[in-house]
């Protein structure tokens, strides 16, 4: 005798499996689709908004790591390397800050099993390098929609990503946990692998454009639900039938995915900035570590809120972000002057006042406002580092200002430099 009045399934394939293992329950089953996936499908038009909510800039790739709560998941054994002390801090430190944005989607049971405080303590190093911890209930679907690549395990999030045509790399297959022959098991078996022990950026750079193929994505989507977009109608119909009530005349609708809070990266760990200057062109790459043999000049940029006060003593640039008239700081003018007084080795104080602007004060006493041009989308701290490199190479800003061409994240960003105070030294005419 069945113990349930209704057993909701998303696909006839599940009915066939149910018939093999528990035929007496088939009569209570109903194929009603997947409301979770239907909400994702309905929100696909808002992908750019979700990317901007995570602070992803043009040219950046959003890498989303996800883990199910099983001990064999990526947050557990991770196929031989724990995610906490190994993979996440390495990814956050090694991937260039302007080329990649990193986010983690962890199953709610991981959050509630260990506790948010413990989890944040474990991931503190990666977060100081700019990792975003995505809300495990309200925002994970938006993060998957926004992703350029997902690194995951055998959990459903990886399968949802593949169904959305997002490239997926499997770092913890856990094939022994999956029923052979199911769509998820077949996907995990055939998906490309991610080696936590290997070169991290190289594996991400090798993902060809358009991976997986649209045919693969269609196969995955077909495995998620056999009735895409129809779950609200089918579920309500089933529920009212169980209650022996007539359905309302109004259409059955799902709650749309909300737009998450703006959560740009906050990197308080020191960054090593590699630059190459050619005229007004400045090539820049910022990361916690500089690859061996990399060409170019290197300087250090440190956020004032760094955990390591000693890093401020050797920083070439010291920065912070906030409202330019913050009374606690005395405004950006007093803050920048104070930084240069307290740290005599610092050459430039940088106050980021918005997503596309910053104020800069140099050791020589010059003050500038930097603004990303209409065709630019670059972290203002990167713009300031570009100006630092250009000035260090002998550049001088004329009274009417100039525009630097900053090369980062595979594109050129025009950055306007406008003096705000009289020159402290005579500058040659702009050429």
Image (spheres, helix red, strand yellow):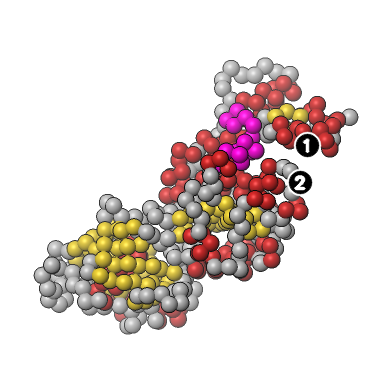
Which residues make up the magenta segment? 217-230
Q: Position of residue 2 (x, y in %)?
A: 85, 31
Query: Residue at label 2?
Result: 179
Q: Position of residue 236 (x, y in %)?
A: 65, 26
**Which residue lies at the image location 56% right of the left edge and 22% below the top edge?**
251
One can see residue 304 in this view: no
**Which residue lies at the image location 62% right of the left edge and 30% below the top edge?**
227
Label 1, label 2: how far apart the Cα atoms are: 10 Å
Q: Quadrant of residue 373?
A: bottom left
Query: Residue at label 1?
Result: 17
Residue 226 falls inside the magenta stretch: yes
Q: Is residue 2 above or below residue 170?
A: above
One can see residue 319 in this view: yes
Residue 351 falls left or right of residue 203: left
Q: Secondary structure at mark 1?
A: helix
Contact (Cβ within 8 Å) of mark 1 with mark 2: yes
**Which residue lies at the image location 62% right of the left edge and 25% below the top edge?**
233
Of the 4 image quadrants, the one containing the C terminus is bottom left
The disc, 1 or 2, on the residue closer to the chain's N-terminal end is 1
């Amino acid at each position: 005798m069945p113990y349930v009045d209704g057993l909701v399934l998303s696909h006839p394939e599940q009915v066939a499996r149910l018939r093999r293992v528990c035929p007496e329950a088939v009569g209570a089953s109903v194929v009603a689709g997947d409301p979770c996936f239907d909400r994702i499908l309905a929100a696909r038009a808002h992908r750019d908004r979700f990317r901007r909510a995570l602070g992803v800039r043009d040219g950046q790739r959003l890498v989303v790591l996800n883990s199910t709560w099983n001990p064999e998941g990526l947050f557990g054994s991770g196929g031989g390397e724990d995610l906490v002390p190994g993979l996440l801090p390495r990814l956050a430190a090694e991937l260039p800050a302007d080329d990649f944005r990193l986010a983690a989607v962890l199953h709610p049971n991981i959050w509630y099993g260990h506790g948010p405080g413990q989890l944040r303590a474990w991931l503190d190093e990666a977060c100081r390098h700019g990792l975003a911890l995505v809300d495990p209930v309200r925002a994970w679907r938006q993060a998957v929609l926004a992703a350029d690549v997902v690194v995951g395990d055998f959990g459903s999030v990886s399968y949802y990503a593949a169904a959305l045509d997002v490239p997926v790399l499997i770092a913890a297959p856990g094939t022994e946990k999956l029923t052979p022959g199911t769509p998820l098991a077949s996907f995990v078996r055939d998906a490309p692998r991610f080696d936590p022990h290997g070169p991290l950026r190289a594996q991400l750079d090798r993902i060809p454009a358009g991976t997986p193929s649209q045919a693969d994505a269609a196969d995955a989507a077909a495995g998620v639900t056999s009735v895409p977009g129809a779950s609200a109608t089918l579920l309500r119909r089933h529920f009212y039938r169980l209650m022996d009530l007539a359905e309302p005349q109004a259409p059955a609708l799902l709650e749309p995915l909300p737009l998450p809070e703006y959560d740009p990266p906050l990197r308080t760990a020191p960054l090593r900035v590699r630059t190459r200057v050619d005229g007004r062109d400045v090539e820049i790459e910022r990361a916690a570590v500089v690859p061996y043999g990399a060409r170019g000049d290197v300087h250090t940029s440190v956020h004032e809120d760094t955990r390591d006060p000693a890093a401020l003593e050797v920083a070439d640039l010291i920065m912070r972000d906030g409202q330019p008239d913050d009374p606690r700081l005395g405004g950006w003018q007093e803050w920048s002057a104070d930084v240069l007084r307290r740290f005599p080795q610092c050459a430039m104080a940088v106050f980021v006042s918005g997503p596309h602007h910053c104020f800069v004060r140099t050791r020589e006493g010059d003050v500038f406002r930097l603004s990303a041009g209409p065709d630019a989308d670059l972290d203002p701290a990167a713009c300031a580092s570009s100006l630092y490199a250009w000035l260090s190479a002998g550049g001088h800003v004329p009274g009417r200002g100039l525009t630097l061409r900053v090369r980062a994240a595979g594109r050129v960003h025009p950055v306007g430099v406008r003096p705000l105070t009289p020159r402290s030294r005579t500058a040659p005419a702009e050429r």
